[in-house]
Structures are given as C-alpha cells and as structure tokens.
C-alpha cells in the first residue's frame, strides 16, 4: 500500500491499484493489519514499517520520531486493534467494548505530538517526538471522531466481501463504498448484468478487499 494526505492506494490480489480515503487519521491506521485474519496485512511489526506509515500519513510532513523499540510497536498495534473494534462497533450500531475504550483513553491521556512556530511564521513539529506522543495524537483523533458530528457516519463498505471502514465526510452523506473505482464499480457491473441478463452462467469472481 502507499499513502498520501488524501488517502491511500490499496491493491487487489491481482495487483490492481485503487484509491481509498478513510476520512480520518485514526482510520488510516486500520489497513496496516489487525487482529485475527487481518494479521496477514501487518506492516507495523518493524520500526521501518511504522516510520513509513508516519511519513506517508495525513500527518504534516517532517515528523521525526525518536528511535522506535518493540514496546513502541506493540503500543501502536494495541491502539490499532482497539480502534478496529470501536470503528466496527460504530459502523454497525453495537455497544462500544469497555476494553477497547480503555486502550484509547489511556493512550489519549499521554501528551500528544507538539507543534511550534518558526521565525518565518510556519508550523513545524517540535524535536524529540516519541511514539507515545504519536499514539496519543491518533487516540485523540479517534475520540474527536467518535464523539463529534460525524460519529453517525462511520461505516463499513457496502460490498458483502469488503470490510474496509471509513467515515463519510461528504456533504450529502451518502457514501456507500470504500471506493467507487473498486467496490462501487463492481456493484454497477453486477447491477448492469442483472438488468440486461448478460454474463448468465458466468459467476463473477469476488476479490478480497
């Protein structure tokens, strides 16, 4: 996967790229892996994986973390896994797990990343940033999301075989798919075949998200 300030580029099992914007910093963390079957997507098991995510996330560029250790990586993965649980619960109207809330709240209690102003009147990251500060910043972003005006717009992709999670920040509030060029387009193709009767006897092969 690759990242940018407006989302990330994922790839199908066949290697075809498609754009996916989860809509929030905390949700950008979710496609990096997770519990259970999501573990096969893990990229936060090395310092390099975490640093690559930081450099390409929607965080402002130029953030340099202090050396990353195994405890740091474990803390980021613990937060991500808790966010998986909370986001899925929000998307499906389930009660939020107390254990997941405890992880997010504990992470948010630490001091966040710090910005400062330069003599040129620009913003920059303060030196000496820690992974604990990064985790706190992500956790606080999650709290803002889940308690803010878009809390009821946290959704899972409408495709039956896609579990990507996002927040719909569009003005109409009618976003249904992880990406129109991916699951939205597949839905349009299936609908067209159903209306026209084309493709009969040729089941469409569903791809993994």
Image (spheres, rainbow, N blue to C red):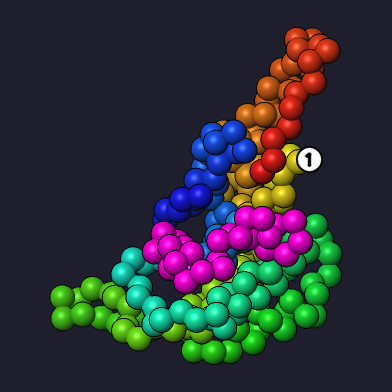
Q: Which residue is mark 1?
A: 160
Q: Give how far across and how far down residue 49 sits, in percent.
A: 48, 64
Q: Choose between 23 and 203: the one closer to the eye.
A: 203
110 left or right, relative to 167: left
10 left or right, relative to 151: left
Q: Quadrant of residue 37?
A: bottom right
Residue 21 lies, with reference to residue 24, above or below; the image says above
Q: Choose between 94 and 204: the one closer to the eye.
A: 204
Residue depicted at 57% across the width and 83% down the height: 71
- 48 falls in the magenta region: yes
Q: Would residue 166 be visible to someone looking at this image?
A: yes
* Element at label 1: loop
Residue depicted at 33% across the width and 66% down the height: 61
Residue 152 lies, with reference to residue 180, above or below; the image says below
Residue depicted at 41% across the width and 59% down the height: 56
Q: Choose between 36 and 194: the one closer to the eye.
A: 36
Q: Main secondary structure of the magenta part?
A: helix
Numbered range of the magenta stretch: 32-58
């Amino acid at each position: 996967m690759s990242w940018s300030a407006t989302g990330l580029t994922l790839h199908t099992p066949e290697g075809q790229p498609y754009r996916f914007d989860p809509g929030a910093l905390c949700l950008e963390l979710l496609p990096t892996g997770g519990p259970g079957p999501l573990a096969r997507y893990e990229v936060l098991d090395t310092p390099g994986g975490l640093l690559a995510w930081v450099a390409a996330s929607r965080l402002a560029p130029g953030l340099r973390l202090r050396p990353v250790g195994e405890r740091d990586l474990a803390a980021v993965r613990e937060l991500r896994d808790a966010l998986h649980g909370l986001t899925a619960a929000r998307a499906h109207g389930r009660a939020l797990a107390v254990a997941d809330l405890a992880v997010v709240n504990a992470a948010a209690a630490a001091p966040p990343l710090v910005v400062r102003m330069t003599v040129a009147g620009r913003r920059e990251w303060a030196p000496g940033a820690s992974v604990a500060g990064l985790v706190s910043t992500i956790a606080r972003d999650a709290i803002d999301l889940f308690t803010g005006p878009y809390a009821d717009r946290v959704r899972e992709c409408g495709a039956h075989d896609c579990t990507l999670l996002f927040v719909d920040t569009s003005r109409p509030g009618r976003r249904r798919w992880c990406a129109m060029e991916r699951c939205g387009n597949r839905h349009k193709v299936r609908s067209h075949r159903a209306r026209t009767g084309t493709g009969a006897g040729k089941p469409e092969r569903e791809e993994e998200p």
